Image (cartoon, rainbow, N blue to C red):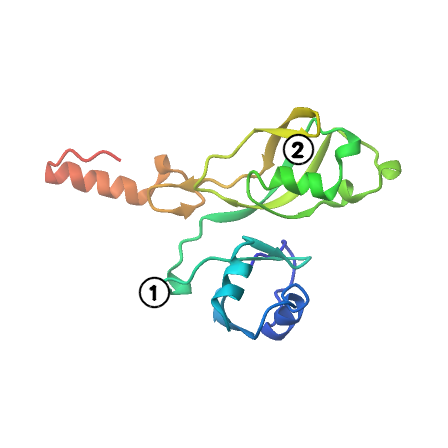
Amino acid sequence: MLWPKGSTPLKVSALKAKLAPLWNTLGRWRITSIGKEFYEFSFSSLEDAQSVRSIGSWNLNPGFVKLFAWTKDFNPSLQQQSSAQVWLRIYGLLQEYWRPKILFAIANSVGTPICTDQVTNKPMFEREFGHLSRVLVDMDLRKEPKYRVLVEQENYAFFVDLDYDNLPEYCHYCSCIGHNQSYCKKAKADREQGEKDGCGYHA
């Protein structure tokens, strides 16, 4: 589960009630909390499971359910966190394109869009500026961030520039958020150990 910053996570019963109208064509299904905001879903048929999995994330407004296939011996406590909620700034988007569907389509190119900010939400006649819009996205920090995206409309296409508010650093060596490999203590320790062992290790 992904919740916007400041949101209160739902209990299992409330979460199931939110999903029920979205999955009203399915047979019986079950949800079980397994900790750390992870949940196990069980379905009465393979077709239902495939139908739900065909959509990568489900918008609960607020919050998103991101789905992935179950893996053997899955342990929520051992999951390495590689994603973070970051405000995406979109530049160069004309006012007529400030619609949730278009904003979310742009944001989807860098992560899972969660919501827009209060200023972006304002009606056109109430906005005091329009040089940028902001969307909160859940980003996988293992991937290189994008800074330009092509927006394609019927018979027309244009680029928008992207930037991020307080994009966290991610270390690809130890898979931790908060520092990069240059400042990774584990990488340094392994490098020093490699030099002692004479194996010519380089991080």
**In front of the other: 106 or 170:** 106
Name the residue tied to disc 2.
Answer: 90
Disc 1 secondary structure class:
loop
Amino acid type at mark 1: Lys
* Depicted 161 relative to depicted 40: above or below: above
Give how far across and how far down residue 202 sits, in percent: 23, 33
Classify residue 133 by image quadrant.
top right
- Number of marks in picture: 2
**In front of the other: 124 or 157:** 157
Mark number for residue 97? none
Classify residue 161 by image quadrant.
top right
**In front of the other: 116 or 72:** 72
Of badges 2 and 1, nearer the viewer stands 1
What's the residue at 67%, 25% (across, down)? Answer: 157
Amino acid type at mark 2: Ile
Name the residue tied to disc 1.
Answer: 72
